[in-house]
Image (spheres, grey):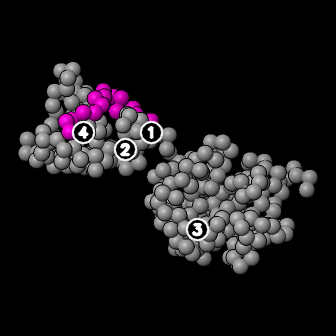
C-alpha cells in the first residue's frame, strides 16, 4: 500500500490504529537506525499483523482519531527524530517507513481534496458535491426499493453499487462541472438524497434527477432542491435546456416538475419504459 492509499483510508475513516502493551506503544529500531512508531489505516490490517507476527503477540489495538495522532503523536515523533511506519504487514513487520511531516501532509492534502464543494444554497437546504464519506448514508437510501423504483432501471443498489455511483458522480463533476449533488437539510446536516444534473440515458441531453430518502419525503424538499438545481443549470451553467423524465404513475414527481415550471414535451422510451418528458429552456434558447 502506498502513502496515498494510506491517506485515502485515513481521510475516509478519520481514524488510525496503533498497538500497545503494558510497556506502552512500541517504537522499534528500523534498518536505518531510527526508531519507528507503527500505525495502520484499518483495524483488520493491524489485527492481521498481531496474528501473524510473533513480535506483536500480546499487543492490543488502540484506535485514535486522526486529529489526536496528528496533534500529539506526530509532533512527538518529530521531536524524537522517529519515523512513522505505515501499515506494516506480513509474517514479519514490513511496510513503509515515512517521515512524520510526509504522513501529515499526505492525509491533510487528501482531506482537503475531499472537501465537498457547495453548489447551491436554499432556505432549508445545501446542495453540495458528494464525497466518499457519503457512501454509507447514500447506500442506506439506495437500498430502499421504495426510493429506487422511480430511478433509471428501478433496481436497488448495495454498498458496492452505490460506491460505483459515487465514482460516476465524481467523474461528472470533473468532466462536466455538474452531476447529482447531495441534498443536505440544514436542520440536520444529514444526506437526505440526491438532486442534480446528468446525461439522459440514450443521448447527450442534460436531465434533472432527484431522489430523497423516505424520512425526508412529504416536506416539500424535493421541490425546493429540484427548483434550485434547475435554476443553477439554466442561469449559472447557461445550459440551453434541461429535461426531466418521470413514470406516468409517479404522481409525486410529476407534481414537482409542474411546480418548478417545467413543461410537458411528450412521451419517450427511456430505461426500458415509456416515460413522460418535461423540459425547461434557458433564457437564450431559441426554442
Q: Which residue is denoted by mark 2 in the rendering?
A: 10
Q: Please state the horizontal and vertical placement of residue 197, each as a whole percent of the image.
A: 68, 55
Element at badge 4? loop
Q: Which residue lies furthest to the top in this view?
A: 32
Q: Please state the horizontal and vertical placement of residue 231, each as a whole percent of the image.
A: 74, 56
Q: What stretch is highlighted in magenta?
A: 91-109
> Which badge, 1 or 3, is on the more N-terminal residue?
1
Q: How far apart are marks 4 and 3 (CA)?
A: 41 Å
Question: Is there a contact, CB below 8 Å, between mark 4 and mark 3?
Answer: no
Question: Is there a contact, CB below 8 Å, between mark 2 and mark 4?
Answer: no
Toward which corner of the image does residue 68 lie, by quadrant?
Answer: top left
Q: Which residue is denoted by mark 3 in the rendering?
A: 155
Element at badge 3? loop
Q: Which dot, 4 or 3, sits closer to the camera?
A: 4
Toward which corner of the image does residue 182 lie, by quadrant?
Answer: bottom right
Instruction: Name the side, left or right, on which 254 lies relative to 5.
Output: right
- Classify mark 1: residues with Cα within 10 Å, few (<14), some (14-19) or many (20+): some
Mark number, residue 90: 4
Element at badge 1? helix
Closest to the observer: 4 or 235?
4
Q: Which residue is denoted by mark 1 in the rendering?
A: 110
Residue at 20 percent across and 39 percent down: it is 91
Question: Is there a contact, CB below 8 Å, between mark 2 and mark 1?
Answer: yes
Quadrant into which the C terminus falls: bottom right
> Which badge, 2 or 3, is on the more N-terminal residue?
2
Amino acid at each position: 500500500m502506498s502513502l496515498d492509499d494510506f491517506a485515502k483510508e485515513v481521510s475516509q475513516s478519520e481514524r488510525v490504529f496503533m498497538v500497545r502493551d503494558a510497556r506502552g506503544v512500541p517504537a522499534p529500531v528500523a534498518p536505518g537506525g531510527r526508531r519507528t512508531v507503527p500505525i495502520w489505516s484499518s483495524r483488520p490490517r493491524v489485527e492481521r499483523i498481531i496474528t501473524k507476527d510473533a513480535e506483536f503477540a500480546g499487543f492490543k489495538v488502540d484506535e485514535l482519531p486522526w486529529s489526536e495522532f496528528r496533534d500529539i503523536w506526530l509532533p512527538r515523533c518529530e521531536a524524537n527524530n522517529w519515523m512513522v511506519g505505515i501499515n506494516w504487514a506480513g509474517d514479519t513487520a514490513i511496510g513503509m517507513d515515512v517521515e512524520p511531516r510526509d504522513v501529515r501532509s499526505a492525509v491533510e492534502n487528501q482531506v482537503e481534496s475531499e472537501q465537498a464543494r457547495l453548489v447551491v444554497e436554499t432556505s432549508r437546504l445545501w446542495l453540495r458535491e458528494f464525497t466518499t464519506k457519503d457512501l454509507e448514508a447514500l447506500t442506506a437510501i439506495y437500498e430502499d426499493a421504495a426510493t429506487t423504483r422511480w430511478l433509471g432501471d428501478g433496481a436497488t443498489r448495495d454498498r458496492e453499487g452505490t460506491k460505483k455511483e459515487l465514482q460516476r458522480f465524481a467523474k461528472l463533476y470533473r468532466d462536466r462541472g455538474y452531476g447529482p449533488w447531495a441534498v443536505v437539510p440544514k436542520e440536520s446536516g444529514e444526506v437526505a438524497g440526491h438532486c442534480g444534473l446528468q446525461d439522459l440515458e440514450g443521448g447527450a441531453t442534460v436531465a434533472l434527477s432527484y431522489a430523497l430518502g423516505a424520512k425526508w419525503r412529504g416536506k416539500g424538499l424535493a421541490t425546493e432542491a429540484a427548483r434550485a438545481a434547475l435554476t443553477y443549470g439554466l442561469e449559472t451553467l447557461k445550459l440551453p435546456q434541461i429535461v426531466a423524465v418521470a413514470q406516468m404513475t409517479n404522481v409525486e414527481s410529476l407534481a414537482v416538475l409542474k411546480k418548478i415550471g417545467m413543461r410537458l414535451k411528450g412521451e419517450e422510451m427511456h430505461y426500458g419504459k415509456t416515460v413522460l418528458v418535461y423540459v425547461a429552456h434557458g433564457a437564450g434558447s431559441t426554442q
